[in-house]
Image (spheres, rainbow, N blue to C red):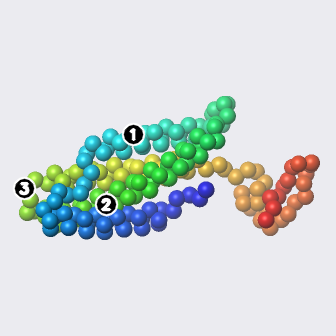
Amino acid sequence: MKLTNPLVLLVIGVGLAAAGWFATLMAGRYSLATPVLPLTGLVTMGVIVVLTLVLGIRVLRWRNGKKKKMLNPILAAWTLVLAQACAYTGAMLLGWHAGIFLDQLRLWNVRSGQAITWQTLIMAGGALVMIVVGLVVERFCRIPPEDGEADGTPGLQGKRGKPKAEGEYAYRGD
């Protein structure tokens, strides 16, 4: 599985910032409520972040050799998928709330109460935490290259070795 590309997260965030700005503009035009998540959404975001971090630390401890018990590979794969989902969801929420914040910013001096503006900033901060935790835990799930692999050892690229013993290969096929 490939690592999450931060550029893709940026594109998602910018696209949803435009969508959030447009949705807020339309909601204001038709006298509807601003489409911002309630602050209770932070509880859900916090649970997801804590769960991702706990599972990621568990995988990291196993990877670093601090655990003697074998790690369930399905749990490790789920942890990786959860970390990636956390990063993508955070990018979406950050973009959406950044777009709403940009629309609300132009009304900062006109409105008496800026509760919605602060709410969007708080939700964007929670989304930023989701992105960071998702990317960090995704790095926890990487397995370091084995000794002697062509990708991990300089100078071995392009060299094909013969099997050292029966069933043991120094090189993986094309």
> Image point 42% across, 43% down: which residue?
49
Amino acid type at circle 2 is Trp
Of the numbered discs in the image, which one, if any, rests on residue 112?
A: 3
Instruction: Give the residue displayed 34% in from the left and 57% down from the top.
Output: 94
Q: Is residue 43 above or below residue 27?
A: above
Q: Residues within 10 Å of mark 3 (few under 14, many from 20)?
A: few
Decide: few, some or many residues near mark 1? Use Cα within 10 Å; few <14, some 14-19, many ≥20. few
Left or right: where 8 falls relative to 102: right
Which image quadrant: the N terminus? bottom right
What secondary structure is marked by label 3? Answer: loop
The kind of residue on which mark 3 rests is Ser
Q: Is residue 173 above or below residue 57?
A: below
Q: Earlier in the sequence, mark 1 or mark 3?
A: 1
* Mark 2, residue position: 96
Circle 2/circle 3 CB separation < 8 Å: no
Q: Are marks 2 and 1 in contact (CB under 8 Å)?
A: no
Question: How far, Cα to Cα, is label 2 from label 1?
Answer: 20 Å
Q: Earlier in the sequence, mark 2 or mark 1?
A: 1
Circle 1: element type? helix
Quarter-of-image position of residue 114: bottom left
Q: Residue 43 in the image: state x and y as whole percent.
A: 32, 40
Q: Position of residue 24 (x, y in %)?
A: 22, 64
Residue drawn where x is 78% and y is 54% of the image: 148
Residue name at image x 47 percent, y 52 percent: 85
Q: CA distance from mark 2 to mark 3?
A: 24 Å
Three-letter amino acid code at disc 1? Val
- Disc marking residue 47: 1
Q: Nearer the viewer, mark 2 or mark 3?
A: 2
Q: Quadrant of the C terminus?
A: bottom right
Of 28 and 61, the residue lying toward us = 28
